[in-house]
Image: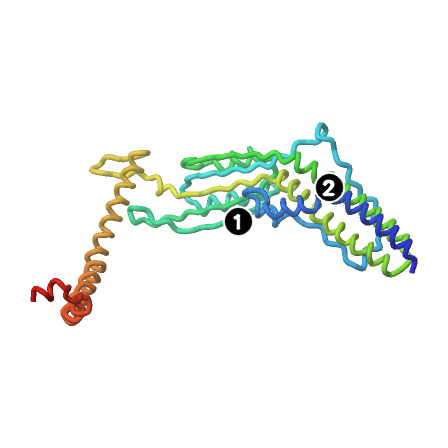
């Protein structure tokens, strides 16, 4: 076995490891994937990941795929936009169907959709729902206008834009360095003369290729999130904002909320009184009765056990 040859290959591998460690691509990319972006866990799952290279394909060469990291000055800004919207409509189920159809028309899709029943203070049960859709960023404003078209009330509308351009450019630079390292490892593998040398290079090549797939997945995540904006909609029925009538007088707005809060307080208080009278008080009576009964049966014995011996002064007096 040519020990000198092995030593040369090992030195080359160590040099590559130093370069890759300086890049810090693997640890940073894994941390980004682990932490994720707030409010975009669905997007991470939706972003397609490139298939990991099979062991039998490692002898393939880089097929002309190149990544030229753009300079920050020329890089188009990567902005991830999200909207949180709350609306009141006459028919929540029908509105959700309209929103889903609208998202598909724009080339988007429905991420999640939930419907449930809400019981109001008046005892009326009304349907409500929530859904999250993704639409192309260029159609965001138009999509919002169509969502708010025909609604009874817009309860809230919160927008957020996150600029991830720096992270995106950094990931591309790391990917370029990893691809260059992969190409160099292929060259080193061509120079290997023994099975031991080939295996040594092969193991390092697998690590680099795994890091490349992680970086590609994170880059794809940013691109998908920026291209498709997320809109989360909470949909309530008109009955939830109907005014309270007291003797023909309608209570609306903040006054209505205050009255509802007062009603909830009295309901809670009455519920507590009922539980106290029906459950807590009888239980306390039973517990106190057993304590009294035990004292009557064993009180004398307990007093004798805890009664101290007479003091010497008392014995003298006696």
Neighbourhood count class around disc 2 (C-alpha, 10 Å): few under 14, some 14–19, many 20 upward: some
Residue that appears at 68% across and 42% down: 219
Q: Residue furthest toward the left?
A: 318
Q: Residue furthest toward the top?
A: 73
Which quarter of the image is occupied by the N terminus? Answer: bottom right
Q: Is residue 69 left or right of residue 32?
A: right
Q: Is residue 103 left or right of residue 251?
A: right
Q: Compared with residue 78, is residue 208 higher up or lower down, i.e. above or below?
A: below
SS for callout 2: helix
Disc 2 + disc 1, Cβ < 8 Å: no
Which one is nearer the viewer's eye here, 304 or 262? Answer: 304
Q: Is residue 152 left or right of residue 194?
A: left
Q: Which residue is mark 1?
A: 112
Question: Which mark identifies residue 212?
Answer: none
Indicate the position of residue 98 as horizontal and vertical percent values.
51, 43
Which one is nearer the viewer's eye here, 49 or 180? Answer: 180
Which sits earlier in the primary sequence, circle 2 or circle 1? 2
Q: CA distance from mark 2 to mark 1?
A: 38 Å
Q: Quadrant of residue 200?
A: bottom right
Residue that appears at 52% across and 35% down: 144
Q: Is residue 147 left or right of residue 179?
A: left
């Amino acid at each position: 076995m040519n020990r000198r040859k092995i030593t040369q290959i090992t030195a080359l591998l160590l040099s590559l490891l130093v370069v890759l460690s300086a890049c810090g691509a693997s640890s940073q990319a894994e941390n980004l994937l682990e932490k994720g972006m707030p409010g975009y866990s669905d997007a991470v799952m939706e972003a397609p990941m490139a298939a990991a290279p099979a062991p039998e394909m490692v002898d393939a060469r880089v097929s002309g795929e190149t990544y030229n990291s753009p300079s920050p000055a020329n890089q188009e800004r990567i902005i991830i936009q999200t909207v949180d919207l709350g609306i009141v409509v006459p028919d929540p189920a029908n509105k959700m169907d309209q929103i889903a159809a609208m998202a598909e028309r724009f080339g988007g899709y429905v991420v999640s959709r939930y419907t449930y029943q809400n019981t109001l203070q008046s005892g009326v049960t009304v349907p409500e729902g929530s859904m999250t859709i993704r639409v192309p960023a260029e159609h965001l404003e138009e999509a919002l206008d169509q969502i708010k078209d025909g609604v009874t009330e817009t309860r809230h509308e919160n927008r957020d834009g996150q600029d991830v351009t720096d992270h995106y450019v950094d990931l591309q630079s790391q990917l370029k360095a990893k691809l260059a390292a992969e190409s160099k490892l292929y060259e080193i593998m061509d120079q290997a003369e023994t099975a031991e040398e080939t295996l040594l290079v092969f193991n390092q090549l697998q690590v680099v290729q795994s890091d490349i797939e992680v970086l590609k997945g994170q880059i794809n995540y940013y691109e998908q999130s920026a291209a498709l904006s997320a809109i989360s909609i909470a949909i309530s029925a008109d009955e939830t904002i109907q005014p309270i009538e007291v003797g023909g007088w309608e209570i609306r707005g903040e006054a209505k909320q205050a009255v509802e809060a007062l009603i909830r307080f009295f309901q809670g208080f009455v519920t507590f009184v009922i539980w106290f009278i029906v459950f807590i008080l009888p239980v306390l009576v039973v517990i106190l009765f057993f304590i009294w009964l035990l004292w009557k049966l064993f009180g004398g014995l307990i007093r004798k056990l805890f009664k101290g011996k007479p003091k010497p002064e008392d014995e003298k007096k006696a």
